[in-house]
Amino acid sequence: MSIATRFGSLNPSSQVTAFTSGTVATPSAKRSFDTSAFEFIAGHVLESETSSLSFTGIPGTYKTLHIRTTARSNGGQGDLNFRFNSDTGNNYHNHLLTFYASNVNAYSQNSTSSTRSACLLTGDTSTAQPLDCFGVGLVWITDYASSTKKKAGKSYCGHAGAYRGGEAQWFDFLWTSTNAITSIEFIGTLRPGSRIDLYGIA
Amino acid sequence: MAGSTFEVIASYTVTSATNNIVMSNIPQTYTDLVILGVARITSTASQSNLKFNDESLSAYGNVTSSNNGGTGLVGARDFNRLQVDGPGALGSTTTADWFAPNEYHIMNYTSSTQKKNVISFGMSSDNGSTLDYCGFQFNVWNSTAPITKITFVTNGTNFAVGSGWTLYGIRGK
């Protein structure tokens, strides 16, 4: 018989059980991490359609920025790209792998006006992409606050559609500036319910 | 904002070979869930998968990227799956004491209006004595229900002793 085990005071009802034979090891005591090591900086959860949104005044007190996205286009399927410090020049380079069904493609995109992509966006209106299907993405930018280094980062993003579509991307991006990143603008028309959260990692 | 940004919710380590490990009553107070762990299977190499709530239907789909055991990049798309197809897990024919790292990001898991997305990363390697795999996946659970239960399940026989996972909650806006 499986054994239910209770956890620390903040989540007293959480349980871990094993259905089959064997014993349930006493789980690790619930604990919190040092709050300064991984901190929520700011976030947007859209209540109405938005064509772009920005994080400004980003503090330079962390080592790495981390962005987590759940988003959907209000137009056709596409990318949620971003740029730094209002730089609209062709100062971004991207290298990516894309996976779509059985297809694998590799690209380099040099001297573009933004990075790709914080999120792959499912398209709108088609019955193959119902409105409750969103794309997701994870982005890391290390040494974002440096004043001596060009900026580089990576992203994993994609969507599995309503299991009738789907694409995955893995890419790195470069910004040819040594300026510390103090603002990030996301470019793409987003539906309500889309979310972008920004975190700082010490 | 109450509570820390990144918190341990639950943790489990296999001490006797078993399958279908359940983490239930997951609090709905975070934005995303993250699972980090390692897995090894008592039968031949297979997968370390997830199921949500009490879903028994073929309600999962995925887009997969893989190095295909070092033979070249491949992509794949599967529908009507019975689980979130997770990272690989080394099996009984591989060198002892090697475990495969598992990482899952379950995004916006408390939403009652959005289908659920999972990003998973994994590799299964015993330093080349058998085929080494690495890759990442995007999964969707075709349900708008908030996730309150996660079951770790292998399509092999059992998870081996030493396998285990920690479930974390990340708070956003």
Image (cartoon, coloured by chain):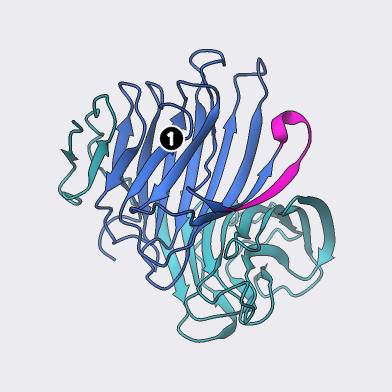
Taking depth in this image into account, of B152 and A78 the one nearest to the observer is: B152
Quarter of the image for residue B71 reads top right
- The picture places residue B95, in percent across and down from the top left corner, at 56, 13
Residue occupying the point 54% across, 38% down? B87
Q: Chain of mark 1?
A: B
Please say whether residue B77 is one of the residues in the magenta stretch: yes
Picture layout, residue A197 above or below residue B10? below
- The picture places residue B17, in percent across and down from the top left corner, at 35, 22
Decide if residue A32 is in sight here: no
Chain B colour as displayed: blue
Crowding around mark 1 (Cα neighbors within 10 Å: few <14, some 14 to 19, many 20+) is some
Considering the image in quadrants, where does the N terminus of chain B appear? bottom left
Indicate left or right for A13 with B14 as reference. Answer: left
Taking depth in this image into account, of B37 and A197 the one nearest to the observer is: B37
Q: Which chain is cyan?
A: A
Name the residue beneath numbered marker 1. Answer: B37
- The picture places residue B55, in percent across and down from the top left corner, at 38, 54
Where disc 1 sits, the SS reads: strand
Picture layout, residue A13 above or below residue A67? above
In the image as oriented, which residue stretches furthest toward the front? B57
Please say whether residue A8 is one of the residues in the magenta stretch: no
Decide if residue A112 is in sight here: yes
Picture layout, residue B101 above or below residue A47? above
In the image as oriented, which residue stretches furthest toward the bottom? A48
Considering the image in quadrants, where does the C terminus of chain B appear? bottom left
The magenta segment is B67-79
- The picture places residue A99, in percent across and down from the top left corner, at 72, 52
Mark 1: amino acid = Gly
Picture layout, residue B86 above or below residue B93? below
Indicate left or right for B33 with A6 as reference. Answer: right
Residue occupying the point 51% across, 60% down? A68
Taking depth in this image into account, of B43 and B7 the one nearest to the observer is: B43
